[in-house]
Image: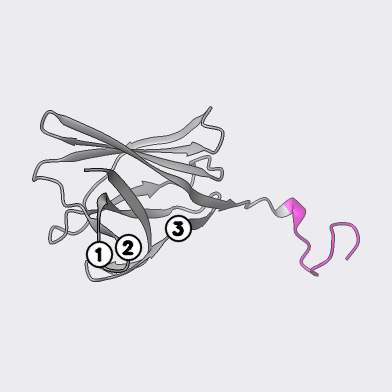
């Protein structure tokens, strides 16, 4: 078993979401990141990894890291938002979280078994810094 994961976007319910290679977020905006656990050793006819549904009582910690891997930016416990599908997990992003483009690292604990996975380049973070934006569409100081 090769534990892996996919980022999810447009999550409405257990049956309404889309897989994504990367999720775009804006720095300073709160929200929720969703992911689905997959088993990289098992694929469907199209080569898509099958979802992995951990045992009841499993826990997961998510770390959002910058690409260089030198600065853990967020480290928190994930939750399962849909009891009908334990492969889907979520983690809240706060307005105070300092985010940069980077990887999402997960640690899944099922009883005494601990597995880790990485979703590389999971986040694309846009700056919320208004000093670089002109309301007229030009460069600051030169509209």
**Foreground residue, 22 or 76?**
22
Q: Quadrant of the C terminus?
A: bottom right
In which image quadrant can residue 11 be found? bottom left
| Depicted 38 relative to depicted 143: above or below | above
Quick check: is 137 in the magenta stretch? yes
Determine the residue positioned at 45% across, 58% down: 21
Sooner in the amino-acid sequence: mark 3 or mark 2: 3
Q: Quadrant of the N terminus?
A: top left
Answer few, some or many: residues within 10 Å of disc 3's Cα (few below 14, many 20 plus, some between 14 and 19).
some
Q: Which residue is under mark 3?
A: 21
Sooner in the amino-acid sequence: mark 3 or mark 1: 3
Q: Secondary structure at mark 3?
A: loop
63 vs 128, left or right, is left
Answer few, some or many: residues within 10 Å of disc 2's Cα (few below 14, many 20 plus, some between 14 and 19).
few
Labels 3, 1: front one:
1
Q: Residue 27's x, y, as percent?
A: 56, 50
What kind of secondary structure does the magenta stretch mostly adopt? loop
Q: Which residue is under mark 1?
A: 44
* Magenta region: 131-143
Residue 138, label in figure: none
Q: CA distance from mark 2 to mark 1?
A: 5 Å
Determine the residue positioned at 75% across, 59% down: 133
Determine the residue positioned at 33% across, 40% down: 117
92 vs 103, left or right, is left
Q: Which residue is under mark 2?
A: 47
Determine the residue positioned at 12% across, 28% down: 112
Q: Residue 121's x, y, as percent?
A: 50, 47
């Amino acid at each position: 078993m090769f534990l892996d994961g996919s980022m999810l976007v447009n999550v409405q319910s257990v049956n309404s979401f889309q897989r994504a290679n990367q999720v775009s977020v804006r720095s300073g905006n709160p929200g929720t990141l969703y992911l689905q656990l997959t088993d990289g050793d098992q694929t469907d006819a199209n080569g898509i990894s099958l979802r992995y549904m951990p045992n009841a009582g499993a826990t997961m910690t998510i770390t959002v890291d910058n690409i260089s891997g030198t600065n853990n930016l967020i480290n928190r416990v994930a939750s399962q938002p849909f009891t009908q599908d334990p492969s889907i997990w979520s983690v809240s992003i706060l307005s105070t979280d300092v985010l940069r483009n980077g990887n999402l690292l997960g640690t899944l604990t099922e009883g005494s078994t601990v597995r880790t996975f990485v979703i590389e380049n999971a986040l694309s973070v846009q700056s919320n810094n208004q000093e670089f934006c002109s309301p007229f569409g030009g460069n600051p100081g030169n509209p």
